[in-house]
Each structure stands twice: as structure tokens, then as C-alpha cells.
Amino acid sequence: MKLRFLRFGLALFVATALLAPHAIAADLTDIGFIDQAQVGSLPAFVDANRKLAQFKQGLDAQFAARIKAAKSDSERQTISLEFQQKFNDRQQELVGPIFARAQLAIANVSATKKLSIVVDKRIIVYGGVDITKDVIGLLQGGQAIAQPSATPPPSEIGFVDQSAIDNLPKVQKANADFQKFVNDTQKVYQQRFAAAKDDAAKKAVAADYDKVIKAKQKEMVQPVLDGLKAANASIAQKKNLLLIIDQGDVVYGGTNITQDVQNELGK
């Protein structure tokens, strides 16, 4: 039997329904969704990604040789940044134009259907307008895609850039302090675990460790989570938002409240 140490991240993902379900259902006609996996399986994307993978394979070999010959950490860091930039440039060259065309197609279809936001299909359980076939039809048409006739109307769906929230000093400090506690506590309990005479004793040590970690998480992390929840609720009420989701799930449109949340948490 091994002692399993729990890991807790400070991921402040928000997906909070702020009004009753019937209020959300009433506005589903202006919410679209798209199957990005299906769009990504189109021949143009597949071919571009195949070429990018081949380029990366050669780049990895060059990188390994350069890193092996590097004489200092500073030189290794410089090499890493250099090769990352080479990969990014090639990715932009191969995938960038196709991605831009897809974004234009999504914007065009959204404008035609008067959608205020388009999200990824994987977060949809019920309702919404599926625009996958419309977008694929435009992409496969071969003709130039016109700029949308209008910008997205104001959306009652808000979104937050989680990476920006995670980088706030208050969040980083809570995360760092909690992780330090976990690391220090692990050392103590590893010794206790090693000294335990039988499985029952080891199980008791593991249970006590879990209890200590969870209690400290509640003490150090929960206040930040509560603060984020309160900030989102306050901003949602001010902006009349029905829902707040993570930016990673938004494909087009929506109301960006990241700066509002940063300002609220920074008070």
C-alpha cells in the first residue's frame, strides 16, 4: 500500500448560471455552437497539421543537438526560445490562413443568424443553434468569404480569461503558499508513512494527511474562490449576464468581463 498525496490546483474556472433555467431558455435562439473537432478534421486543417508535425519532427532533432552542445543554462534558455519561435512562425504560416478563414466563416454565419455568441459544442447539453454545417459549407465552397455585415449584438453570456485571473498577485500568492504547505507536509508524512508498522497504520497516516491538506486548502484557497464567485456575481448583475463561462469555450462573440473581474479582485 502506498501513500497517495493529494494535489490541489487553484483553477478558478467559472460556469455559473445566475438566473433561473427558464430565463436562459428564452434566449437560446441567439446562442450558437460549433463542433470544432469536425471543422478541424477538414482536409485543409489535416494537411496543414500533418506538415506542421513533420516540420516539428525535424526541428526536435535540431533542438536536441543544440541543447546537448549548450554550455550554460542561459544558452539553453536562448536556444529554447529560438526554436519555440521557429515553430510558432511555421505554425502561423501553415495553419494561420486556414484558421483566419474559419474565423471569418464563423463570423459571417453568426451575423446572418443574428447570434450574440458561439461556443464549442462540447459544453452544450441542450438548446442553442448548431452552425457547424453552415460554417463547413462556407469553408469548402472555395469562394472568398465576405466580411460579416454586422458585429455581434450585446450578449448575455459573459466569459473570463482564466489564465489572466490565475496571474493576479492575490491568486498566485494563494497558490504558491498552498503549494509550499503541501510540499512541506508531504515530507513530514512521508517519514510517518515509512515508520508505520503495518497497512492499518499506513492507512491511518494517509487519511490524516488527506484531512490536513483539505483543511489547509479550505483555509488558504477557499477565500480566493469565494472572492472570485462574489466578483462574478456582482459583475453579472451589473451587466445583466445570464451565464459566465471560460474564454476557452468561446468561439465568437460574448461579453468579455476579464478586466472587470481583475478590477474587482484587485480591490
Image: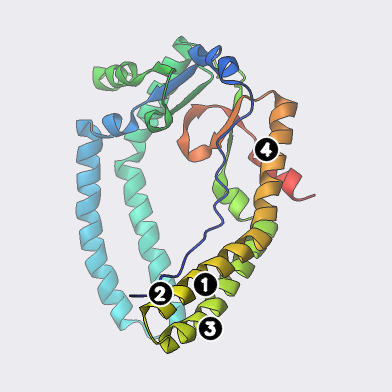
Give the side of residue 251 with respect to residue 259, left or right.
left
How many residues crowd around disc 4 within 10 Å: few (fewer than 14), some, or many (20 or more)? many
Q: For the residue labelled by badge 2, is the local secondary structure a helix, a strand or a loop?
A: loop
Q: For the residue labelled by badge 3, is the local secondary structure a helix, a strand or a loop?
A: helix
| Measured Cα–Cα span from mark 2 to mark 1 | 9 Å
Q: Can you see residue 260?
A: no
Q: In this view of the protein, which residue sits in the foreground, 96 or 27?
A: 27
Give the side of residue 185 with respect to residue 222, left or right.
left
Amino acid at pointer 3: Val
Q: Can you see residue 38?
A: yes
| Measured Cα–Cα span from mark 1 to mark 3 | 10 Å
Q: State which tag comes first along the sequence, 4 or 2.
A: 2
Q: State which tag comes first along the sequence, 2 or 1.
A: 2
Relative height, residue 91 to residue 1 (above, below): above
Asked whether the residues under the numbered discs 2 and 1 touch, taking CB atoms below 8 Å apart as contact, a structural biologist would say: yes
How many residues crowd around disc 3 within 10 Å: few (fewer than 14), some, or many (20 or more)? few
Q: State which tag comes first along the sequence, 4 or 1.
A: 1
Q: State which tag comes first along the sequence, 2 or 3.
A: 2
Asked whether the residues under the numbered discs 3 and 4 touch, taking CB atoms below 8 Å apart as contact, a structural biologist would say: no
Relative height, residue 28 to residue 100 (above, below): above
In this rendering, the label closer to the viewer, 3 or 4? 3
Q: In this view of the protein, which residue sits in the foreground, 95 or 262?
A: 262
Q: Which residue is mark 3?
A: 188
Q: Which residue is mark 1?
A: 209
Amino acid at pointer 4: Asn
- Residue beneath the point at 69% across and 23% down: 240
Residue 127's image quarter? top left
> Residue 74 at x, y = what percent?
46, 79
> Residue 108 at x, y = what percent?
43, 17
Marker disc for residue 232: 4
